Image (cartoon, rainbow, N blue to C red):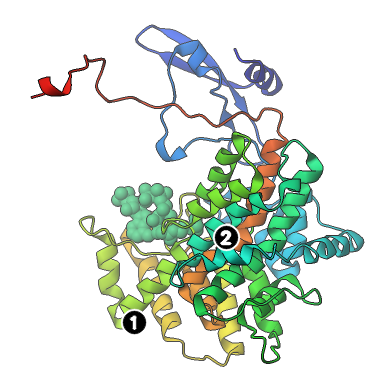
Amino acid sequence: MAKEAAAAKAASNEYVTLTDHSTGESYDMPLMPGSVGPKVIDVRPLYSQTGHFTYDPGFTSTGACESKLTYIDGEAGILMHRGYSIEDLAEHSDFMEVCYLLLEGELPTAAEKAEFEDTITHHTMIHEQLQYLYRGFRRDAHPMAIMVGVVGALSAFYHDSTDIADPVQRMIASHRLVAKMPTIAAMAYKFSTGQPFIYPRNDLKYAENFLYMMFAVPCEEYKVDPILARAMDRIFILHADHEQNASTSTVRTAGSSGANPFACIAAGISSLWGPAHGGANEAVLAMLNEIGSPDRVAECVERAKDKDDPFRLMGFGHRVYKNYDPRAKVLQSSAYEVLNSLGVHDDPLLKIAMELERIALEDDYFVERKLFPNVDFYSGIILKAMGFPTSMFTVLFALARTVGWIAQWKEMIEDPSQKITRPRQLYTGPTSREYVPVDKRG
Ligand code: CMC
């Protein structure tokens, strides 16, 4: 039995027994408890003892790591970061504090918070030469394509924070990534519009600064609306981390080989881009526009239920939540706040979204499968009202998730049981066959 598994078994003193009925042999697999949530069966000794692998495409039943960062109870609709509920953080905290919490493990004292904000503020500029990288893209490039390229390229500019074995460099890279993402994201937008890049300002808070870099132009004064800055900050909090989702697992997998943090985050951005993951916020808005009016909602729900139609209700369903996504609840109330403050009292898209939610939540198909609105369902409506083009929605998700990715990456590097990620497979291809020269192939 592997050393760690033996230790786990001894520690928990609980195990499950697997029986191979073809041989009559039984094997004890240790059960490992977490601080809360389901125990895991430690299958590390499985192959050496039985000669078999487990099979779990999509990792529906697999715990791939140990983590102290984020806990989700999908049945109850609970999300906590380091023990603090997402509702409390969204209401009482701010994004900088949540970043500190994820990176350092505790909420900061006032002095620690001030120091952390100062550090982040003083890392917001990017190397001037990176401008030329932007200028190499087509103007109509998707900003996510630019993000993947520019964030990956940071590793070519910040050599002094790529030694993953050095904890100081790991922390500097983490601060740099959190600090520079708003600048990089805003520059991707500015490039697409043809407007000049706007440099960060040290007198502005994180979310304010981002809105400023997005929407200011050099020829006139731009005042950031405090209600929008607060809504932006809350959106960042709600997207900060989410356990071992596809992009986070991608970051961990990339990092498990020893790749530098900038390359790992670029890999995470690529994974986030897909419509089943972070790309869903963009897809929700496209769907609401396509539906066009509340009286066409029922027809669209019918399409989503039709197995011969690839159409799915974007912003609905989640691998882990089998209840209302708690982030969607916070965003729903934020949507009203933002629209009211902007004087939008009759947003047609919000009307369609509410009708869609109402019909879907009453429909047997969605009820039986426990398909509820997820975080992406309302975020697009708020972001659109704030003036963001849909192509920037997933970029904002990436910006906010960077702290989660990097905190997970750091946790992995600092975990002594960390190994390169190397899953196995069930091979179903041809068995051994003889090579036939090309002139003899029929
Ligand atoms: N519309 C219609 N049917 C759905 C939907 C949906 N949005 N989501 C799941 N289903 C059905 C699915 O067809 C399946 O039905 P059946 O059991 O009859 O075959 C059942 O519900 C279970 O779905 P699944 O695809 O096996 O579940 P999954 O855990 O593999 O996928 C998901 C989860 C989020 C990819 C999926 O629900 C989905 O595609 N949703 C729409 C895209 C979306 O909103 N993604 C954002 C997720 S939250 C933020 C993030 O992760 O970035």
Q: For this view, does 224 lie left or right of residue 28?
A: right
Q: Secondary structure at mark 2?
A: helix
Q: Quadrant of residue 14?
A: top right
Q: Residue at x 73, y 70 (%)?
A: 206
Q: Residue at x 67, y 73 (%)?
A: 210
* Location of residue 54 with respect to 390 vertically, above or below: above
Q: Is residue 378 visible?
A: no
Q: Which residue is mark 2?
A: 398
Question: Residue 27: horizontal and vertical position, in percent?
Answer: 50, 13
Q: Earlier in the sequence, mark 1 or mark 2?
A: 1
Question: Residue 151: horizontal and vertical position, in percent?
Answer: 60, 56
Q: Secondary structure at mark 1?
A: helix
Which of pointers 1 and 2 indicates the residue nearer the eye? 2
In-front residue for pair 27/65: 65
Q: Around disc 2, counting alpha carbons within 10 Å, would you say few (fewer than 14), some (14 to 19), or many (20 or more)? A: many
* Location of residue 177 with respect to 334 vertically, above or below: above
Q: Tell me the quadrant of the picture where the N terminus can be found.
A: top right
* Location of residue 177 with respect to 200 vertically, above or below: above
Q: Which mark is residue 294?
A: 1
* Real-space Cα separation, disc 1 to disc 2, in angstroms: 31 Å
In-front residue for pair 319/250: 250
